[in-house]
């Protein structure tokens, strides 16, 4: 597989025309719509009767490529070789099964094997591989077991190596954890034995080929037009905003929507572990952290990048997520003229997010008194948006709270909007609830208006 691992994902578009000129039968199979995740247990246990044949053809293609001295291999070359092998009567593949075998082999060699269809499909927001025999997807906010499987751990490790090598990463027993991304921006986390006792585990957080827009959030019922108008005014009015929420709650999606409100004439620096924020503005500098090499050296952390970003004359700093000592540097950036900065944090409530920020600042090694940390928090952060994934699978902005200052030793907050539900569900199993304005007029309105942004007081009427 060494030669095949040099395949570059960017070759996909360059060979499209040549692929399309080949067998229409095979092309249709290679791009067929994915099977639904809900399949019977019997189908999940069905044995691949062509496993040995596919393995033989796979090895034959590698030998052919090595014999012919292919230095650079693209999808078109693989397509032609595979087309010849599949239609060779030596392998005794019935004509009716050839498109299916072709598609599976093609995905194995140049794609992501049995999960290729899942990656390409817009139906699934997350793909979870728990060893070679268990692949789950998140569909409509719910986890569903699919009938997809890898042949064995070696097959899965080959696909993992193909994914991580695209971004210059490596994973093996000596370096068993890795964050990477697919060419479409989807985030990939890998952890392999000996740390994982169930075999290689891969979690793919997918992002749509077209980022979700603000209007779609309203259509999905995640937010109301008034709330959205207020948040747009907050971004344009250069408030420092934190999006808080649990895993898979939609924090990054909301961060993308908020970032879209930034004016085109501003210089934006984004900082992330694995690039996920998708900005359409022209003046965007994307920075990505780097893990240590095999010798444990060369790591560039989020904190390093935040410090460096302050020297890059940014109008806005967007950190994909603060989770450690970089939180102190982010607060200092917000307090030293970089208004309008945005970030996300893992927390269950706005109040919990304040507590987490305090804890993470303490992790920086600076022995600051708690009162000084809270003063920094109260001065730096203007707004906390709570994003939640409810038990019915829907994602909603459940709270918008303003940080208004200090009352004694406590950071004072007031809620502006909230989502209320009594736990009842409708015929579709969705929670029945409604968004409400608390009737509070935010203190930050003056700062927003001072930056030339109009605020409508009717947004806050309950």
Image (cartoon, grey):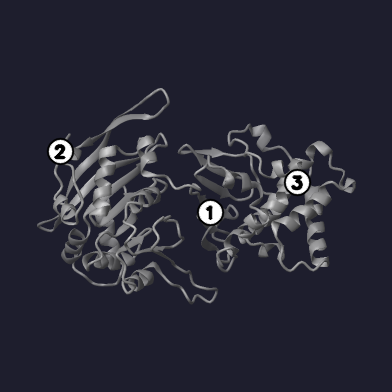
Quadrant, the C terminus: top left
The residue at which mark 3 appears reads as: 102
Q: CA distance from mark 2 to mark 3?
A: 62 Å
Residue 433 x %, y %: 30, 30
- How many C-alpha atoms fall within 10 Å of the one at disc 3: few (<14), some, or many (≥20)? many
Q: Which one is in front, 73 or 413?
A: 73
Tell whether 293 sits left or right of 133. Answer: left
Quadrant, the N terminus: bottom right
Q: CA distance from mark 2 to mark 1?
A: 42 Å
Q: Taking the image as drawn, is residue 358 in sight?
A: yes
Q: Quadrant of residue 135?
A: top right
The residue at which mark 1 appears reads as: 184
Earlier residue among tags 2 and 1: 1
**Identity of the residue drawn at 63% across and 52% down:** 112
State whether residue 79 is above or below residue 229: below
Residue 368 x %, y %: 21, 70
Check whether the beta carbons of the residues at disc 3 and disc 1 lie within 8 A of each other. no
Q: Quadrant of residue 303?
A: bottom left
Residue 150 x %, y %: 67, 49
Mark number displayed over residue 439: 2
Determine whether the residue tagged by mark 2 lies in a helix, strand or loop.
loop
Determine whether the residue tagged by mark 1 lies in a helix, strand or loop.
loop
**Identity of the residue drawn at 37% across and 58% down:** 321
Q: Which one is in front, 56 or 216?
A: 216
């Amino acid at each position: 597989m060494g030669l095949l691992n040099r395949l570059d994902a960017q070759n996909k578009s360059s060979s499209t025309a040549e692929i399309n000129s080949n067998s229409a039968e095979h092309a249709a199979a290679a791009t067929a719509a994915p099977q639904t995740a809900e399949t019977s247990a019997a189908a999940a246990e069905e044995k691949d009767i062509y496993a040995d044949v596919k393995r033989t053809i796979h090895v034959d293609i590698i030998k052919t490529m090595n014999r012919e001295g292919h230095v650079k291999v693209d999808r078109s070359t693989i397509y032609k070789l595979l087309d010849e092998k599949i239609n060779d009567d030596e392998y005794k593949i019935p004509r009716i099964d050839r498109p299916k075998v072709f598609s599976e082999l093609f995905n194995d060699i140049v794609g992501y094997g049995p999960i290729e269809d899942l990656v390409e499909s817009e139906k699934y927001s997350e793909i979870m591989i728990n060893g070679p025999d268990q692949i789950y997807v998140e569909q409509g906010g719910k986890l569903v077991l699919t009938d997809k499987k890898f042949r064995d751990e070696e097959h899965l490790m080959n696909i993992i190596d193909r994914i991580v090598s695209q971004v210059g990463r490596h994973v093996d027993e000596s370096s068993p954890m890795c964050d990477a991304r697919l060419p479409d921006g989807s985030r990939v986390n890998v952890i392999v034995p000996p740390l994982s006792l169930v075999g290689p585990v891969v979690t793919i957080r997918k992002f749509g080929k077209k980022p979700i827009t603000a209007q779609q959030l309203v259509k999905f019922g995640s937010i109301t037009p008034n709330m959205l108008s207020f948040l747009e005014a907050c971004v344009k009015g250069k408030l420092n905003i934190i999006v808080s929420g649990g895993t898979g709650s939609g924090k990054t999606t909301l961060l993308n929507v908020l970032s879209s409100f930034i004016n085109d004439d501003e210089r934006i620096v984004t900082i992330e572990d694995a690039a996920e924020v998708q900005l359409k503005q022209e003046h965007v500098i994307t920075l990505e952290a780097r893990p240590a090499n095999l010798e444990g050296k060369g790591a560039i952390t989020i904190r390093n990048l935040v410090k460096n970003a302050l020297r890059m004359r940014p109008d806005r700093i967007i950190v994909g997520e603060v989770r450690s000592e970089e939180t102190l540097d982010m607060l200092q950036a917000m307090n030293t003229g970089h208004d309008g900065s945005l970030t996300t944090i893992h927390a269950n409530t706005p109040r919990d997010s304040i507590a987490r920020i305090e804890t993470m600042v303490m992790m920086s090694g600076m022995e600051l008194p708690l009162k000084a940390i809270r003063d920094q928090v109260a001065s730096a952060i203007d707004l906390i948006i709570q994003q939640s994934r409810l038990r019915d699978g829907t994602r909603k902005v459940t709270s918008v709270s303003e940080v208004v200052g200090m009352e004694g030793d406590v950071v004072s907050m007031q809620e502006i909007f909230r989502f209320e539900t009594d736990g009842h569900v409708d015929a579709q199993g969705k929670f029945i609830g409604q968004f409400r304005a608390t009737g509070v007029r935010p203190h930050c309105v003056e700062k927003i208006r001072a930056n030339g942004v109009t605020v409508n007081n009717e947004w806050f009427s309950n």
